[in-house]
Image: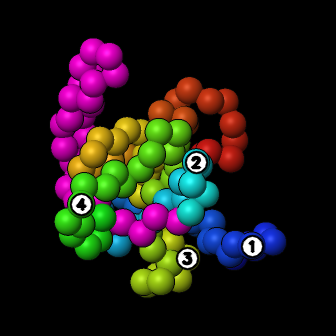
């Protein structure tokens, strides 16, 4: 479904990409909540385990990593503080025209950012949120 506001056109994902459908180098994007700009990125790795330091290390399982589509020669973070919760979606400039929802950005460091799979988020929501539209 295509929507538009005063300055941006965006596409609302209508499908969820399953775990098996997400592969390395898939072109994806997210809109940063701080910069408000669209970040064109790629899936760097799928199904990883990662320890992320939030004051003390926290281990995450079954994440996917995203990074810049083109190598950067100066280290530049993919996401900024405050971008957590942004949806990672398939890039609409590539088929299909209606992008799939890949997941949600949860953390980042100077080299990559990390996302939880949409399929896991929906499974959690269906078992924890009483809502008929999730069925």
- Give the residue at the far right of this rendering: 6
Q: Secondary structure at mark 2?
A: loop
Residue at image x 18%, y 37%?
49
- Left/right placement of residue 91 relative to residue 53 reads right
Q: Is residue 58 magenta?
A: yes
Please name which of the two marks, 4 or 2, marks the residue nearer to the observer: 4
Which residue was labeled with disc 1?
7
- Of callouts 3 and 2, the N-terminal one: 2
Please name which of the two marks, 4 or 3, marks the residue nearer to the observer: 4
What numbered label is drawn on residue 34? 2
Residue at image x 47%, y 39%?
81
Q: Is residue 89 visible?
A: no
- Of callouts 1 and 2, the N-terminal one: 1
- Of callouts 4 and 3, the N-terminal one: 4
- Of callouts 1 and 4, the N-terminal one: 1
In the depicted view, which residue is nearer to us: 69 or 118?
69
Which residue was labeled with disc 4?
74
Q: Is residue 94 magenta?
A: no
Q: Position of residue 101 (x, y in %)?
A: 48, 60
């Amino acid at each position: 479904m295509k929507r538009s506001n005063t300055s941006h056109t965006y596409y609302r994902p209508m499908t969820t990409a399953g775990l098996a459908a997400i592969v390395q180098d898939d072109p994806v994007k997210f809109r940063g909540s701080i910069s408000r700009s669209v970040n064109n990125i790629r899936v760097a790795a799928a199904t990883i385990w990662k320890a992320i330091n939030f004051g003390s290390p926290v281990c995450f399982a079954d994440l996917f990593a995203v990074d810049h589509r083109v190598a950067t020669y100066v280290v530049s973070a993919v996401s900024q503080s405050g971008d957590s919760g942004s949806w990672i979606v398939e890039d609409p400039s590539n088929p299909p025209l209606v992008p799939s929802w890949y997941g949600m950005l949860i953390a980042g460091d100077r080299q990559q950012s990390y996302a939880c799979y949409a399929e896991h988020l929906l499974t959690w929501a269906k078992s924890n949120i009483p809502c008929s539209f999730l069925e």
